[in-house]
Amino acid sequence: QVQLVESGGGLVQAGGSLRLSCAASTSIAGFDAMGWYRQAPGKQRELVASITRGGTSNYEDSVKGRFTISRDNANNTIYLQMNSLNPEDTAVYYCHGYRTGWGRYDYWGQGTQVTVSS
């Protein structure tokens, strides 16, 4: 059973920074891509950033230049460095990964709360 465990969320003032971590129970090299989603109250879950097995990253427009996704294959962990946070970034952040083979398999973490105060 693949598990993704997030950590690093919390309360921060506007303009501050946080780094989220997502530790996988298996080799992350086995995932086609991994990423971070977020869901704010009353809103749909949205993709914030993703990184492929080859290291190509993509970002949602509102976080470009502020957030950085990275991966550490040796430690089976991905990170989301979040700078210049603003209240609109407040949400539950979820780690996600998917693998393909005999079909597509999606995996989710339990989520970590990020709250940005103004």
Image (cartoon, grey):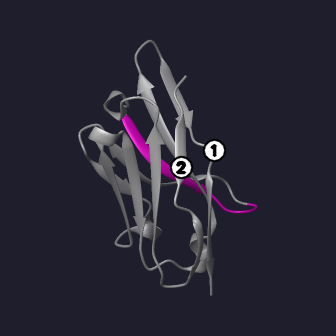
Q: Is residue 70 left or right of residue 36?
A: left
Q: Is residue 18 above or below residue 27?
A: below
Q: Residue furthest top?
A: 102
Q: Residue furthest bottom?
A: 118
Residue 54 in the magenta stretch? The answer is: no
Q: Residue at x 36, y 34 (%)?
A: 28
Q: Is residue 111 left or right of residue 78?
A: right
Q: Which mark is residue 110?
A: 1
> Label 1 is placed on what type of residue?
Gln
Q: Residue at x 51, y 24 (%)?
A: 105
Q: How many circles with numbers are drawn on the protein? A: 2
Quarter of the picture holding the C terminus: bottom right
The residue under label 2 is: 6
Quarter of the picture holding the N terminus: top right
Q: Is residue 58 left or right of residue 113?
A: left
Q: Is residue 101 above or below residue 56?
A: above
- Front in this rendered view, residue 58 or 81: 81
Q: Which mark is residue 38?
A: none
- Front in this rendered view, residue 74 or 103: 74
Q: Is residue 77 left or right of residue 95?
A: left
Q: Earlier in the sequence, mark 1 or mark 2?
A: 2
Q: Secondary structure at mark 2?
A: strand
Q: Main secondary structure of the magenta part?
A: strand
Q: Secondary structure at mark 1?
A: loop
Q: Residue at x 37, y 68 (%)?
A: 64
Residue 15's spot in the image, x, y percent?
A: 48, 85
Residue 51's spot in the image, x, y percent?
A: 34, 46
Residues in magenta, as a range: 33-42
Q: State how far apart marks 1 and 2 are (Cα).
A: 7 Å
